[in-house]
Amino acid sequence: MGDIFDLVRAPEWLGQAVRPYHAPSPEQAAVVLRAVEATIAAERRFFDAVRGKVAEGSVEIEYLLGNHDRLLAHAPAARAAVRRALGLRGGEDPFPTRRVFPEEGVLAYHGHSVDAVCHEPDGAAPLGDLLASELIVRFPVEIRRALGVSHPSLDDIDDVRPVLAVPAWVRSLAEGEPRHVARVVARVWRELIEEFLENGYVKDWMRAHHRPLKLDLAQRVKLLLALSARAKQRDEPRLTQLYYLLFRLIDVRLARAAVKELERREHRGLQFVVNGHTHFAGMKPLGVIQGQSACYFNTGTWRTLHQLGNVARGRPSFMAYDAAAYLVFFGKGDPLGRRFEWWQGAGG
């Protein structure tokens, strides 16, 4: 359900004049194609295994777009490369953004459409594209340049949750290093945020999303970034709590959006909504909708999560783990009467 290719945070953008948040162009599509081909080459064992299952007829795949691979909508050659890698038909045909499975009563889509940071209704580049390419991708590059080090774990920076804990996570990698490292990390993060807030595209987004006389989304984002730029190490737990509060609000919006979808006339008979997007798996019973019990699922992510512990006092610490969510829906004729099976676990 989207984001199989992380095109927004691909290193292929570094050093390019064209950016993922620019208007679609042949130059942008060429970078997308290079990123797709590089990903396929790096994960060849995965794609070979999936393509083999498709070829033998034991698996059928539906590819839905998310926010991190939304640029495939503007890159026909890249779509064809994705289909070749997965053994799918359709060539350069557009990818859908949602899929209905009427026999199982399921509506599936990525979920970013209710996250205003990661989606614009008119199809324009969301703020999330700017955050990813101008902060998250550049931060490890600037840290390596400033410190003259090449810590391999810095490449996991886009798996850190919450995002505003990235400076604390980088400092945790530098434990045992000279004390000036923490100061350098804080300085680089502060400089990148100051540059980010002066970016013309960011300013345009802030103006477009400003609502007079209220603490709107633009002001909340700007406030969080400004606080993280100036925060001391002792302030990070409180900043993280604030971020998690906003995160929980996003999760609530996803569930409420699922209710609205199931209430639509064209979705009569559907019982389940499945999303991804937030990277944290879970399920939430929604109550009775159109005469039947409904449920919302989030399948989380396949990627390793570096999650900040935010309950115990003391200096920030992170736990890295691989999450696994297993979700199957059954047709109404299942001999055991099952409608779904949902299993969730983690290994660290």
Image: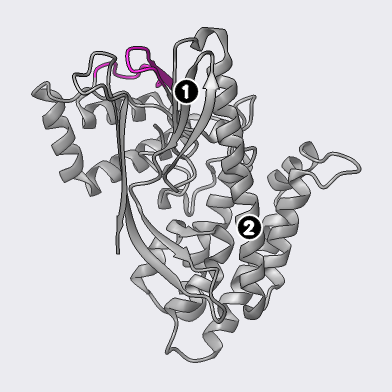
Of residues 170 and 283, which is closer to you in this image? 283
Q: Does residue 189 sit above or below 9 in this rendering?
A: below
Name which residue lies at 23% across and 46% down.
Answer: 43
Name which residue lies at 35% across and 30% down.
Answer: 78
The colour scheme applied to this rendered structure is one colour
- Taking the image as shown, residue 227 lies to the left or right of residue 148, namely right
Which of the 4 image quarters holds residue 6? top left
Q: Does residue 50 sit above or below 200 in this rendering?
A: above
Of residues 77 and 186, which is closer to you in this image? 186
Which of the 4 image quarters holds residue 63? top left
Principal secondary structure, stretch drawn in magenta: loop
Question: What's the mark number on residue 271?
Answer: none
For marks 1 and 2, give the one nearer the viewer. 1
Q: Position of residue 315 (x, y in %)?
A: 54, 81
- Taking the image as shown, residue 63 lies to the left or right of residue 240, namely left
- Inspect this view and state whether residue 245 appears: yes
Name which residue lies at 74% across and 51% down.
Answer: 220
* Residue denoted by label 1: 293
Residue type, label 1: Ser
Magenta residue check for 103 = yes
- Taking the image as shown, residue 221 lies to the left or right of residue 339, namely right
Residue type, label 2: Tyr
Read off the magenta span: 89-106
Q: Position of residue 29 (x, y in %)?
A: 44, 32
Q: Position of residue 153 (x, y in %)?
A: 36, 69
* Residue denoted by label 2: 243
Magenta residue check for 160 = no
